[in-house]
Image: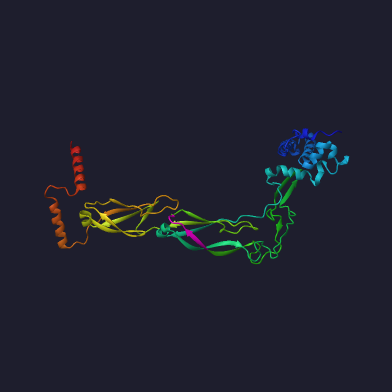
């Protein structure tokens, strides 16, 4: 009986790509699989022909022989060497597992790469406002996992590993249920294909040991709470020669006794005496870089803001230097002596003579109260 053309079996053109052939096989295999056609006895025969066609056309060498000589080029009985469905040492499980592995979790991709990047680490660094604004260099101690010096990260005393007997070194195990095959990562070696037979006594076969290392960290000027500084390669060691992870230094700036920061600007509350507020004067104001003179004009009221330009923070991401904003609080005298109280009373009496308004906010407030009650009465 003459065999049907393999390209017609898979319903693809003769110049179809490997991807198109695989896609066609997947569709037809799912359609004619015996488990899905229990009431159709002809489906199993059709399924076998589809398998055979895919086994030939998915192999570049067998496909070339088939294109040149037809079935004679791949049929074992015609002298074409090993071919057909059993060709190349493969069977239905190999072909079926390769196509459907991505659906059922197998993958068919062979052993998993052993090289793995190490984990990233985080270190919380507390800074004073002065250090955050000016920048500094400090040393930190970080507990981390480093490559074992006893086995050089291999996990083995001899530095060698043996073939995993569960998967014969393939990194994958196959479960067969009738004609249905599922390929999974080997649970013994976790896909590496090898196991350590003589674990290192220092790291107990893990290839890594815990250690506290000291690192120098350069803090740029202007950092603020929430900023992160990345130290490349200072995280945990990788697996089997893989690169180390990174260390992220998380900045937290402590509250300051005098200043409050808002981005590039600093704020402070400045108490002044009643006399200076009324008559004016000059005060020494603290900044993060030293003291400066601030001139207070006469008749200054509580809450007035004075701006000291360039006395704020130079931002770490660039931009102009911020300002220092000083908010005035006029203090009421306390613990007055009898003589001082008498002088205050005399001063208050003098404010009520002459017709001059000496308390503008009080007078405007009283005018507002009077207007309110006039409206209520009317």
Taking the magenta stretch, the answer to whether it contains residue 216 is yes
Residue nearer the viewer, 43 or 28: 28
Q: Is the image coloured rainbow, by chain, by secondary structure, or in one colour? A: rainbow
Q: Residue at x 77, y 39 (%)?
A: 57
Residue nearer the viewer, 215 or 168: 215
Residue nearer the viewer, 211 or 167: 211
Q: Position of residue 353 (x, y in %)?
A: 11, 50
In screen coordinates, is 72 left or right of 239? right
Q: Quadrant of the C terminus?
A: top left
In screen coordinates, is 71 left or right of 341? right
Q: Residue at x 73, y 48 (%)?
A: 175
Q: Quadrant of the N terminus?
A: top right
Q: Position of residue 239 (x, y in %)?
A: 63, 57
Magenta range is 215-223
Query: In this rendering, is residue 278 above or below 101?
Result: below
Q: Tell me the quarter of the picture where residue 277 sits.
A: bottom left
In screen coordinates, is 31 left or right of 72? left
Q: Position of residue 251 (x, y in %)?
A: 46, 56
Query: In this rendering, is residue 236 above or below 178?
Result: below
How many marks the image carries: the answer is 0
Taking the magenta stretch, the answer to whether it contains residue 44 is no
Q: Position of residue 115 (x, y in %)?
A: 65, 55
């Amino acid at each position: 009986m003459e065999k049907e053309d393999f390209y017609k079996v898979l319903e693809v053109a003769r110049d179809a790509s490997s991807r198109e052939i695989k896609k066609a096989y997947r569709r037809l295999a799912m359609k004619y699989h015996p488990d899905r056609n229990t009431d159709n006895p002809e489906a199993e025969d059709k399924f076998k022909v589809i398998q055979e066609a895919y086994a030939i056309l998915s192999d570049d060498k067998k496909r070339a022989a088939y294109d040149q000589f037809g079935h004679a080029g791949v049929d074992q009985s015609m002298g074409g060497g090993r071919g057909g469905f059993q060709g190349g040492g493969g069977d239905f499980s190999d072909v079926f597992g390769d196509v459907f592995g991505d659906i059922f979790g197998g993958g068919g991709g062979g052993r998993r790469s052993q090289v793995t990047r190490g984990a990233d680490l985080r270190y919380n660094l507390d800074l004073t406002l002065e250090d955050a604004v000016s920048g500094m260099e400090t040393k930190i101690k970080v507990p981390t996992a480093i490559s074992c010096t006893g086995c050089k990260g291999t996990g083995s005393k001899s530095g060698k590993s043996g073939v995993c007997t569960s998967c014969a070194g393939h990194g994958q195990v196959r479960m067969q249920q009738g004609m249905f095959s599922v390929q999974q990562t080997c649970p013994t070696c976790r896909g590496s294909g090898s196991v350590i037979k003589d674990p290192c006594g220092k790291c107990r076969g893990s290839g890594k040991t815990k250690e506290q290392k000291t690192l120098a960290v350069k803090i740029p000027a202007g950092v603020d709470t929430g900023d992160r500084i990345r130290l490349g390669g200072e995280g945990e060691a990788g697996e089997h020669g893989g690169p180390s992870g990174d260390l992220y230094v998380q900045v937290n700036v402590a509250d300051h006794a005098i200043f409050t920061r808002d981005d590039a600007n600093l704020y402070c509350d400045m108490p002044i005496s009643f006399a200076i507020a009324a008559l004016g004067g000059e005060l020494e104001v603290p900044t993060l870089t030293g003291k400066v003179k601030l001139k207070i004009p006469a008749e200054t009221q509580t809450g007035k803001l004075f701006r000291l330009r360039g006395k704020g923070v130079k931002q770490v991401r660039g931009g102009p230097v911020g300002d220092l904003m000083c908010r005035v609080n006029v203090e009421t005298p306390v613990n007055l002596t009898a003589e001082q109280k008498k002088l205050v009373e005399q001063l208050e009496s003098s404010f009520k003579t002459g017709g001059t308004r000496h308390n503008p906010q009080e007078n405007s407030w009283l005018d507002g109260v009077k207007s309110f009650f006039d409206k209520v009465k009317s």
